[in-house]
Amino acid sequence: VDDRPPFSFAAATRVAFSDTDAQSIVYYGRYAPYFDVARVEYFRHLGIDPHDADDRHGELVMRHFAIDYHAPAVFDDLLEVYCRIEAIGTTSLTFEYAVTKSPTGQLLATARQVMVNVDLAQRKPCPVPDRVRAAVAAFEQWESA
């Protein structure tokens, strides 16, 4: 049973030797960078510059991060890291991820992140820009943003 939500975007990566542990599988902490890469590429795909805080009117700060591990990955596996934005709040974005092994599609891990848009100078949450809302809604084919 495939319990993953529908995804329209994925970023490919390959397991490096340095990602593995003494058991010769991907160390659990190495999944976070895989999700980071997918999130940055997701924004880039939407035309939002991932390196320009002015383009987002703030910086995304991690509020919540939960990962479930389903199967191990090993050195040199080709991975697809799926990413989508599930919801947009006033100041937050909720991301969902799924990592699969290519070409089999075996589900390896799923994750959920809530990130808050923060004005770093004031150290306070700030609204998610309308431009970001509109780009995500169009890409994710939401009926309303």
Image: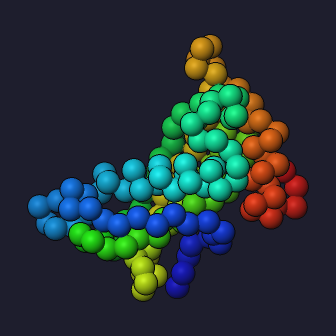
Residue at left offset 66%, top offset 39%: 92
Q: Is residue 138 above or below residue 94?
A: below
- Is residue 136 visible to the viewer in this orientation of the structure? yes
| Residue 103 in the image, given as x and y percentages of width and height | 43, 84
| Residue 113 in the image, given as x and y percentages of width and height | 54, 49
Q: Is residue 136 above or below residue 122?
A: below
**What is the basis of the colouring in this image?**
rainbow
| Residue 119 in the image, given as x and y percentages of width and height | 64, 22
Please, which residue is most extreme toward the right here?
144
- Is residue 109 visible to the viewer in this orientation of the structure? no
Q: Is residue 42 above or below residue 6?
A: above
Left or right of 142 in this view: 17: left
Residue at left offset 63%, top offset 30%: 53
Residue at left offset 39%, top offset 50%: 33
Nearer the observer, 98 or 68: 98
Tell me where residue 122 sits by quadrant.
top right
Please, which residue is most extreme toward the top here?
122
**Count of numbered marks:** 0
Tell me where residue 90 sits by quadrant.
top right
Left or right of 107 in this view: 17: left
Residue at left offset 58%, top offset 20%: 120
| Residue 79 in the image, given as x and y percentages of width and height | 41, 70
Q: Is residue 79 above or below residue 21?
A: below
Nearer the observer, 80 or 27: 80
